[in-house]
Amino acid sequence: LNQVFLNILSNALDALKDSSKLVKNPQIILRTEVIENNKVRISITDNGLGIPTNIQSRIFDPFFTTKPVGKGTGLGLAVSYAIVKKHHGKLTCHSTVGEGTEFHIDIPIQ
């Protein structure tokens, strides 16, 4: 799960760097909560520019990247998705262009 957190936080940092001139007070917010009495939800939210609508459906595809050639191997979200699924959990993303992106990692407590 550390790899999942690292991938999502790294992408959030990149998003905030890319939008630093357009976003006042860039932030990443981490929250945890118990949901459905038997799961923990870790939410990672940034207030960057959001993920363009036309690529939102592809972010969990293997090797998908928004970076130029030679700048990394991808967003790491396909691997993150597989890791969370292996823990019987769920990884979801909600993004609004111009407002930011939020990832939810839902994992069973037991």
Image (cartoon, rainbow, N blue to C red):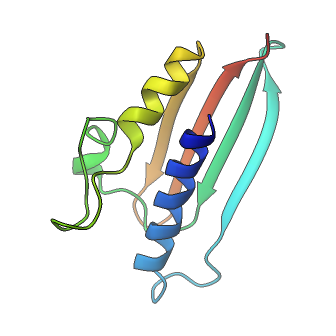
The one nearer the camera, 57 or 99, is 57
- Residue 14 position in % (x across, y down): 45, 69
Is 29 located above or below residue 106 in the figure? below
How many numbered tags mark residues here? 0
The residue at 60%/36% (across/down) is 104
Quadrant of the image containing the N terminus: top right
- Residue 76 position in % (x across, y down): 39, 45
The residue at 56%/48% (across/down) is 102
* Outermost residue to the left: 69
The one nearer the camera, 70 or 44, is 70
Is 98 located above or below residue 42 in the figure? below
* Horizontal relation, residue 34 to residue 87: left or right: right
- Residue 13 position in % (x across, y down): 53, 68
The one nearer the camera, 42 or 54, is 42
Quadrant of the image containing the C terminus: top right
- Residue 20 position in % (x across, y down): 49, 84
Q: Quadrant of residue 45?
A: bottom right
The residue at 44%/55% (across/down) is 96
* Horizontal relation, residue 109 to residue 25: left or right: right
Is 74 located above or below residue 79 in the figure? below
The residue at 77%/46% (across/down) is 31
* Horizontal relation, residue 19 to residue 39: left or right: left
